[in-house]
Image: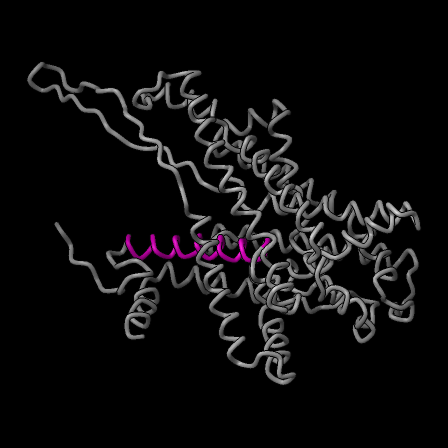
Amino acid sequence: MKKVLETLYNIYRIEELRERIILTLGMLLVYRIGAQVVLPGIDSVQLADLSSRADGAGLLGLLNAFTGGAFANASVFALGIMPYISASIVVQLMGIAIPYLQKLQKEGESGRKKINQITRWLTILICIVQAPAYLYGLSALGVPDSAFVLGRGPLFIFSSVIILVTGTIFAMWLGEKITDKGIGNGISLLIMVGIIANLPLSFAQEFVSRVTENNGGLMLILIELVLWIVIIIFCILLTLAIRRIPVQYARRQTGGSTADRTVYGSRQYIPLRLNASGVMPIIFAQAIMFAPAYIGGIMGDSDAGQWLQTNFSDIFGFWYNFIFALLIVVFTFFYTAITVPTNKMSDDLKRSGGFIPGIRPGNETSEYLDTVMSHITFPGSLFLAGIAIFPALVVKLIGIQQGWALFYGGTSLLILVGVAIDTIQQVNSYLLNRHYDGLMKAGKTRRSTI
């Protein structure tokens, strides 16, 4: 405990780091407050059915988790930051096929700014489409007509669309300011704080179910917590695991005369991540997995339609998770292939005078990197699929409640782990730059070696 307090004190002593953390916490607080502000013209008391639907699993539960409850509250941040995430994914995928975006990606900082501007405009377009769909879909989600105090006329729809679009833009601005002036990745932190907001209630419901209903008691709660910690450790290993490819740089000579020349060659490595695609395969697969149930509904009372609705409406069922895991493996290979350009890596390595020992520069290096990437992506994809379907396993085998089970894997847990690691690494770099031990060490002042 003393070491933890010393580390916190060292963080407080670094003025720049302290100001960045305070700014980050302040902006996250603003985002959480906005998630509770209901749209004008909607009676918040009559949103019980929407909350009950969104508190469960499935797409609504996922959207509500990512928005920190703003979706179920019909708040000004109901769309959350997800339109910006969707726009970023679209721009990233378009960068593979559109030469203009490929050119911007090679222009460095100026190109990045232009890509960010394109992403912002695309975010607004996505919001303009999603906002009316959300407003008109509230009735289908259980919100009664009496909840719309001013009715659902053109004035209400127009004003609410403007508010929802503005809310997303403001949330996007908060995320970018946190990235620039705060600590950590702002967009990821906004998603993380929304997920964490549902954690206490989910655990409280599980605790009450186990203890008050005599359904395992405190001992089973302890086992669940230990299992949860083990899964978090596995997620950390999956996030940090890399394969190091050794790289040798050609020897160079410096100096004018023969006596002044220095011949040197450096040896480094290329880090290839075991899970280079992050949580994107899970997001893509989860989006597709809602199609079978929808198709089954269209097919009606036929045997095939009933089978699709029965087996793919339950996200904790066998067939749902079996197909879900297969799609994650496929999308992991697909997303890794488009985000890890082995050809570009080979060309950059050749231009800088580097080479992989025993491998010829050029096409042979590109093929070698592609082969290694395929070999490490396969176990990484299986690991990712296992983590994604683990909530279904704990529901079926241990009987954990669905809300609490969602924190045992899937998108939520991987986002929490990834953002936490990224933020800790940034804080750690500030401590090391000020001659303190890292965040995970004792926190004592380092002696200068000069």
Quarter of the N terminus within the rendering: bottom left
User: In which image quadrant can residue 92 be found?
Assistant: top right
What is the span of residues highlighted in magenta in the rendered image? Answer: 410-432
Figure colour scheme:
one colour
User: In which image quadrant can residue 356 be found?
Assistant: top left
> Residue 52, image x and y in percent?
76, 69
Which secondary structure is most common in the magenta stretch?
A: helix
Name the residue at 58% across, 36% down.
Answer: 335
On the picture, is 44 further left or further right than 347?
A: right
> Residue 55, image x and y in percent?
71, 66
Q: Is residue 126 magenta?
A: no
| Residue that protrudes farthest toward the left in the picture | 259
> Residue 428, image x and y in percent?
34, 56
**Where 41 falls versus 364 (above or below)?**
below
> Residue 56, image x and y in percent?
72, 65
**Where 316 falls versus 260 (above or below)?**
below
On the picture, is 124 further left or further right than 328?
A: right
Examine the rendering and report whether any part of residue 31 can be seen. Answer: no
Name the residue at 59% across, 65% down.
Answer: 30
Examine the rendering and report whether any part of residue 212 can be seen. Answer: yes
In the foreground, 120 or 287: 287
In the foreground, 6 or 234: 234
